Image: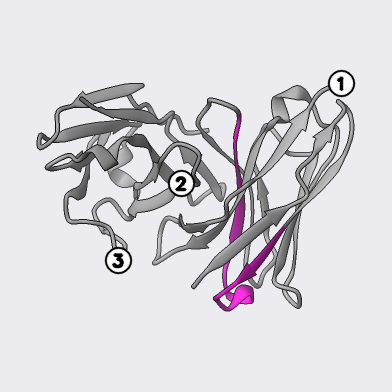
Amino acid sequence: EVQLLESGGDLIQPGGSLRLSCVASGFTFKNYALSWIRQAPGKGLEWVSGISGTTDGTYYADSVRGRFTISRDNSNNTVYLQMNSLSAEDTAVYYCAKVRSHGVGRYFDSWGQGTLVAVSS
Amino acid sequence: SYVLTQPPSVSVAPGETATIPCGGDNIGTKSVHWYQQRPGQAPVLIIYYDDDRPSGIPERFSGSNSGNTATLTISWVEAGDEADYYCQVWDGNTHLAFFGSGTKVTVL
């Protein structure tokens, strides 16, 4: 059974930094791309960032590019999201999701339960 | 950026059919995926590549995609289908994913 367990969410002041972690199990971690997807309170889903399985290609939404950094540790089955220069607009539940692809197009076949990041003074 | 447009809400009586559109420029040329999110829970994949269902997803859920609109159809709606539904596409050129704004399905 695939499991994704996020951690690291916290209440943080504007301008601060935070690192989220997502520990995966139940699949061959290094073979899969992963993404972070967030959901602000009462709002919809927003894709934030993704990282390839073996090539370590990284990708970012315009809203976070230059402030967030995604990385992975295949030896520990963990993906990270380093978040800098946080603002109130970054307040959200952050989900880690496993990426699947059978050709053109990708989708998210497994999700964690999320971790809450609240940015407030 | 690629914009996906969904109606904020859809209401349907039990046993009837709910139709949820997802509009996008030439979306018929892209693969569309759908997620269900019940209150307080993480999203769950219910349709991938326009019309495929993961194992465990009832046949009552189906999808289609053509032109400028993809559609999620829920047949014989049940009270347990009350949730938010999101469409999603992937831009292969930029490696970015985009979600629709979400549709809240209310079972009357």
Subunit of mark 1?
Answer: A
Q: Which region is colored magenta?
A: A22-40
Q: Secondary structure at mark 1?
A: loop
Q: Residues within 10 Å of mark 2 (few under 14, many from 20)?
A: many
Q: Residues within 10 Å of mark 3 (few under 14, many from 20)?
A: few
Q: How is the image coloured?
A: one colour
Q: Is residue B56 above or below residue B93?
A: below
Q: For marks 1 and 3, give the CA distance.
A: 45 Å
Asked if residue A101 lies in the magenta stretch, the reply is no
Q: Is residue B27 above or below residue B33?
A: above
Q: Which residue is located at x 52 percent, y 49 percent?
A: B93
Q: For marks 1 and 2, give the CA distance.
A: 30 Å
Give coordinates of residue B36: x percent, y percent: 37, 44
Residue type at numbered disc 2? Pro
Asked if residue A32 lies in the magenta stretch, the reply is yes
Q: Is residue A4 above or below residue A120?
A: below
Q: Which residue is located at x 42 percent, y 45 percent?
A: B89
Residue type at numbered disc 3? Ser
Question: Is residue A13 rendered to the left or right of residue B106?
Answer: right
Q: Secondary structure at mark 2?
A: loop
Q: Residues within 10 Å of mark 1 (few under 14, many from 20)?
A: few
Q: For marks 3 and 2, give the CA distance.
A: 16 Å
Query: Which mark, by number, is residue B55?
Result: 3
Q: State if disc 2 and disc 1 touch (CB < 8 Å).
A: no
